Image: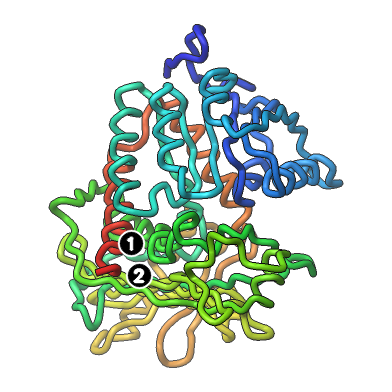
Amino acid sequence: MEEETGNAPVTFTGAKGEIKLMTLDPGHFHASLVQKSMYDQVSPTVYVYSKEGSELNAFLASIDNYNGRTDDPTSWKMEVYTGEDFLEKMIQEKKGNVMMTAGNNRNKTKNIKAAVDASIHVLADKPMAIDTEGFEILKEAFASADKNGVLLYDIMTERFEITSLLQKEFSQIKAVFGDLEKGSLEDPAITKESIHHFFKEVSGKPLIRPAWFYDVSQQGAGIVDVTTHLVDLVQWEAFPGEIIDYQNDIELINAKKWKTEVSLDQFGRSTGLEAYPDYLGKYVENGILRIDSNGEINYKINDVHAKVSVIWNYQAPAGSADTHYSIMRGTKSNLVIRQDKKENYIPELYIEPVEGVDKQAFEKELNDAVAHLREAYPGIEVSRDGNTGWKVVIPQSYRTGHEAHFMEVTEKYLEYLVDGKLPDWEVPNMITKYYITTKALEMSNE
C-alpha cells in the first residue's frame, strides 16, 4: 500500500522496521501494552507526543520496564515531545506513518480525524467516540481515511479471548447450535454482561487511575465505554463477515444508565489524590462522587434481540474479580460463558442442549464437532457438566490473557496495512458499533 510520509512514498510490504509508530496522548495503560512486545515490521524508535505529567511518566516507566525485564526484553527507543500543542506538532513533523492513541476520550475523536486528514494511519484504543457529536466526527474520519488511503482501526482485544472465539465457532456448527433464536425483549437471543471494578491491586500495588477516569465527559459513561467490546462481539460472533448497516439493520429499543457511588477515601485510594478535582464537583453530592458508570442497552440486530450491560463497582469482594457472562441461544443448544466463583473467575464455555433435544444423539454430534475443531484448536475437549450439558476443556496454552491480546490485535492491523485494506465489513461495522453505543447514551439521557 502506498502512502505519504513527508515527501517519500512508502509501500508497506512487511519489511523490517517499515512501520514508524507515533504515540499520541498515552493517558491510559493500554498505550504501553501495544509495546509490550516487539514487531519486526515496526521500527524500534517510537515518537511520543503528549502533555507533561504523571500519565506520560507512567507510560514511559512501563516501556522502561519492558526494556529492562529479564525474559524477552524489548528494545524500544522513545523520542518524546511534550507541549500543549502535541497534536499539531505530530502532524507538522510527521516523523511516523502510524499513530497509536489510548488516553483521555474527550478529544480522542477529533485527534483521530486530524491524523487521518493528514494521511496518517491510526490504531486507536476504544472507545473512539463517547457521544453523538463524537459519532458524527468519527463518520467523517472514516470517510477521510478512505479518501486518503489510510486505515483507521480500533483495538478489539476480546475477539482474541479463547472462550469468545470458541463461542463463535460453535455457533456456526448447525448440528450443535442449530439456528440463532430471534429472542424477545424479556429473553434476548444474545446477552453479554460484564462487571468491572475501579479499585484493583496489581502485583500487590493499587492500580492508580487518573482522576479524569471518573469524569464521564472525559472517559465516557459506562454505556459507551466497555459496552463497545460487548456490542462488537455480538456483531462479530452472530454475523461473521457480514456488513451491518446501522440505518437498516439496527433497532434500538431502550437504554438505561445508573450510578456508582465512590467516597472521597475510596477515590483517594484509587487515584492517589486527597481531594476531588474541581471538574468532578458537578458529580459530588454530600461528599460522595456519583458516576454514570453503569448501563444497559436492548436492541435488535437483523431482527435478533440482543442485550449488553456493564456494571462498575468500586472494589471486588475478597477472593473475587471482574466477571463476564455471555449467552447465545440456539434452536439446539445454548452457548454460555461464565466467569464466577465456580470457575475461579476464569471464563469458561458451556454447551447446554435445549429442552427436547436427545442428549445421546447430541453428544455424538458434539464430539464430531469437537474433533473437527481440533484441527484449528488442538487439544480442546468437552466434559459432562452435571445434567445440564458440557463444559469445553480448554488447554492452558490458549489462556494468553488480556495483555497479550494487544499484541495480537496489533499484528492483525499490521497484516491489514500490508494488504492495503481492512475486510469489507470492518468499517461499516465499526460505524454501527459506535452508533449503537452513542445513540443508547442519548436514549438513556431522555
Q: Position of residue 155 (x, y in %)?
A: 48, 47
The span from disc 1 to disc 2 (Cα, nearest Å) is 9 Å
1 or 2: tag closer to the N-terminus: 1
Find residue 97 and name its label: none
Q: Secondary structure at mark 2?
A: strand
Query: 300 left or right of 268?
Result: left
Q: Residue at x 60, y 70 (%)?
A: 198
Q: Is residue 278 left or right of residue 413?
A: right
Residue 246, visible in the rendered structure: yes
Percent x, y for residue 357? 26, 85
| Residue 24, x across and y down, in percent | 57, 36
What element does badge 1 sit on?
helix
- In the rendered view, does 124 fall on the left or right side of 257? right
In this rendering, the label closer to the viewer, 1 or 2: 2
Q: Quadrant of residue 315?
A: bottom right
Quick one: label 2, few (<14), some, or many (20+) residues within 10 Å?
Answer: many
Tell me if label 1 and label 2 are in contact, CB under 8 Å: yes
**Amino acid tagged 2:** Val
Image location of residue 63, percent across then percent down: 74, 42
Return the residue nearer the eye: 324 or 23.
23
Q: To which quarter of the image does residue 81 belong?
A: top right
**Number of dots carrying numbers:** 2
Residue position for label 2? 308
Q: Is residue 348 visible?
A: no
Which residue is identified by label 1? 234
Q: Quadrant of the N terminus?
A: top left
Q: Amino acid at mark 1?
A: Val
Residue visible at 79% across and 41% down? 64
Q: Quadrant of residue 100?
A: top right
Q: Residue furthest top?
A: 7
For the point 23% across and 72% down, which residue is it? 254
